[in-house]
Amino acid sequence: MLSCRIHAKDDLRIEAVDEPPVAPGQVLIRLGAGGICGSDLHYYFEGRNGSFVIREPLVPGHEASGVVARVGSGVTRVEMGDKVAVSPSHACGRCDYCRDGREHLCRNMRFLGSASLYPHVQGMFCEYFVMDERQCYPVKGDVSLGELAFAEPLAVALHAVNRAGDLLGKSALVTGGGTIGCLIVIAARLAGATSVTVSDVLERPLEAARAVGAVRTIRADRDADALADAQYDVAFEASGSFAALKACVSAVKRGGTIVQVGTLPHEPLPFVVNEVMVKELDLKGAFRWGIEFDWAVEYISSRRVDVRPLLSGQFPLQEAVKAFQLAKDKSQSTKVQLIAA
Ligand SMILES: [Zn+2]
Ligand SMILES: [Zn+2]
């Protein structure tokens, strides 16, 4: 079977590997669709994602859906042929954070497709992969495998909105109109925000944001003044840009909340701590997700959330390099996915 492996910066290879064995309690899954995420792009184009550096070949991919191809003994949660969303988060379930219901902060986390540990925890950009049955979320109905692969990024957005606190009656700003920014627009509207504004430095992400319900869009590069007035209750920084974080600090009202979702560049950053102090802002981080993955699968499989406007293209695994290049070009794409040919 084929596997997509990043050996180093700019060195992505499609390689033939053996099909993995299936142990009791495990499930063999044939890839349905796998979304290319910003972190996958960082691994390919930079050889690192923030402080996580590639030290051996890494199979990227943590946003995947698939079809159950084989089940190990004792498996009860899924059956052969089931359509499943796959949770890439393997928390230990035993540490103090897990027991406190914050398993994304687990002390012993093994997150798929990540170089945070060595040996790396391999991801799902391959024809077949093995999962513990508890990672698999079977769904019925006509929802496509492409839509199901949005469960992970939607969970990120739901978690960010959860971190912001009550949004009923609030105005929100989202900096960055990529997949996560657009999904935050959807999640903030679900949570009762009266209006959501999105800023970006490109036109296409703003079009995508309008398509999913942003009432106002701002070209941050041309109209910086539009972000200078403190007029939003809550801001979500989803672009990974320090300039955007500074814009959030200016654009939220006194006493407002900023949720940092994007990964900023791995370098020392100056920070306007005094503005956080003087405006009495709540600055919060949102990292991955916990129970929100379950909610995301529900929202997508019932189409309460329709992610289809965000899917820009699908490519077979063999064309992974082409897919990564398109995914990187935000003037051409929102979400790009790999599929098993
Ligand atoms: Zn991701
Ligand atoms: Zn744990």
Image (cartoon, rainbow, N blue to C red):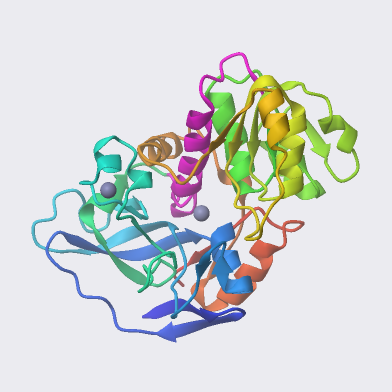
Between residue 73 and residue 227, name the one nearer to us.
227
Which residue is farthest top? 169
User: Magenta segment range?
Assistant: 143-172
Residue 207: in sight, yes or no?
Answer: no
In the displayed structure image, the side of residue 69 where residue 214 appears, left or right: right
* Magenta region includes residue 234: no
Residue 146, x across and y down, in percent = 49, 53
Residue at image coords 67%, 30%: 276
154 to 168, vertically: above or below: below
Between residue 70 and residue 173, name the one nearer to us.
173
291 to 10, vertically: above or below: above
Q: Quadrant of residue 108?
A: bottom left
Which residue is farthest left? 74
In the displayed structure image, the side of residue 246 where residue 170 appears, left or right: left
Q: Quadrant of residue 142?
A: top left
Which quarter shows the N terminus? Answer: bottom left
Residue 315, x across and y down, in percent = 56, 68
Residue 341: in sight, yes or no?
Answer: yes
In the displayed structure image, the side of residue 132 where residue 161 appears, left or right: right
Residue at image coords 40%, 66%: 124
Residue 163, x across and y down, in percent = 49, 31
Residue at image coords 86%, 31%: 226
Residue 228, x across and y down, in percent = 84, 30
In the displayed structure image, the side of residue 21 where residue 281 appears, left or right: right
* Magenta region includes residue 158: yes
Q: Main secondary structure of the magenta part?
A: helix
